[in-house]
Amino acid sequence: METTPTGAGPQAAAPLLQVDGVTLAFGGVRALSGVGFGVQPGSITAVIGPNGAGKTSLFNTISGFYRPTGGSIRFEGNDITRVPAPQRARMGLGRSFQNIALFRGMTVLDNIKLGRHAHLQTNVFDALFYLGRARREEAELRRDIEERIIDFLEIDHIRHAPVSALSYGLQKRVEMARALAMQPRILMLDEPVAGMNREETEDMARFILDVRAEWGVTVLMVEHDMGMVMDLSDHVVVLNFGQVIAQGTPALVQADPEVNRAYLGSGDVGELRRKLQAAARGNTAVGAA
Ligand SMILES: Nc1ncnc2c1ncn2[C@@H]1O[C@H](COP(=O)(O)OP(=O)(O)OP(=O)(O)O)[C@@H](O)[C@H]1O
């Protein structure tokens, strides 16, 4: 498929993140083929697509866990295609994972502290216990940031609880807290509301909007919950079989026949149709079931 840099019209600001012609293969499986899109600063951009479309592969490529076989990724104008993942995190690419990747035996606070590791010139244990080369002032600044995050995400009451004792929704929130502790310029959320009940979904949607409004963080998310995607996103990128088949505003994407066809082929039609129809009627309550 032809790929052109998008989202960067004459009036638009330079994209914070620009993905161009990215291709990724696992042996004979082409997970991504010429994927291209831009993420505008201050936007909420969603990547959607049926199961196996390549969304996680794309996220892993952007955050540096996978090296693409072709194409380029630019962040704040710099080519980061060959920059290792930890360095990308330090540059401001923060992310959460589809399957929660917290240290379950550790407390909420200690998990959040691990987020700071991306910025301290010290090893992970130093980061936890403020030892070694970690400078005191920097540690204090980090503590302030952590306190703000804990307050912001309303997790003060569980700060000393082991992660394993928390509900799934709270664990997802702690994961977001840890990603925020890295002070990202762009926060990449992999299925932030997967497995959540409606109330947890609505809470998370509110936090995502507030992160953008209060912290000025740009958000790029992969999400299956169409109600949430259509409610929150400025720009939606639709993947199918590793290719971008449509992108634009939620309204534009919802009306695209190829998008509907892609989902029709995915088997999970009923629920998606219902959500798209509800969204089209203006009944776009977040996480509408
Ligand atoms: N590590 C891997 N090794 C081999 N093939 C892989 C690997 N990861 C993904 N794939 C394949 O690449 C394609 C895209 O998978 P990916 O997990 O990126 O899709 P997805 O859109 O995230 O799916 P889901 O919505 O189910 O999470 C699929 O065909 C998948 O089988």
Image: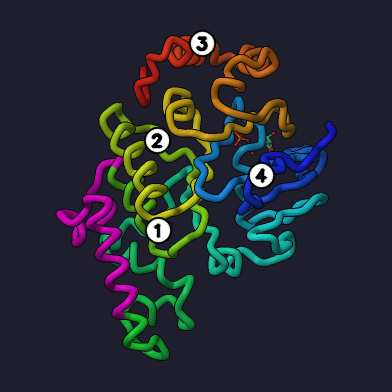
Report the quarter where the N terminus lies: top right
What residue is at 66 percent from the left and 66 percent from the top? 84
Q: Is residue 72 left or right of residue 217?
A: right
CB under 8 Å between discs 3 and 2: no
The Cα–Cα distance between marks 4 and 1, rounded to whole angstroms, is 22 Å
What SS does tag 1 mark?
Answer: helix
Type of amino acid under label 1: Leu
Residue 219 in the image: x percent, y percent? Answer: 49, 46
Q: Name the residue under label 2.
A: 193
The Cα–Cα distance between marks 2 and 4, rounded to whole angstroms, is 23 Å
Type of amino acid under label 2: Val
Question: Which of pointers 3 and 1 lies earlier in the amino acid sequence?
Answer: 1
Q: What stretch is highlighted in magenta?
A: 140-169
Viewer-proximal residue among 15 and 153? 15
Q: Which mark is residue 73?
A: none
Type of amino acid under label 4: Gly
Q: Is residue 119 left or right of residue 57?
A: left
Residue 139 in the image: x percent, y percent? Answer: 33, 80
Question: Which of pointers 2 and 1 lies earlier in the amino acid sequence?
Answer: 1
What SS does tag 3 mark?
Answer: helix
Asked if residue 26 is among those painted magenta in the image, a careful observer would answer no
Q: Residue 180 carries which label?
A: 1
Q: Name the residue under label 3.
A: 273
Question: Which of pointers 3 and 2 lies earlier in the amino acid sequence?
Answer: 2
Question: Which of pointers 2 and 4 lies earlier in the amino acid sequence?
Answer: 4
What SS does tag 4 mark?
Answer: strand
Residue 76 in the image: x percent, y percent? Answer: 64, 60
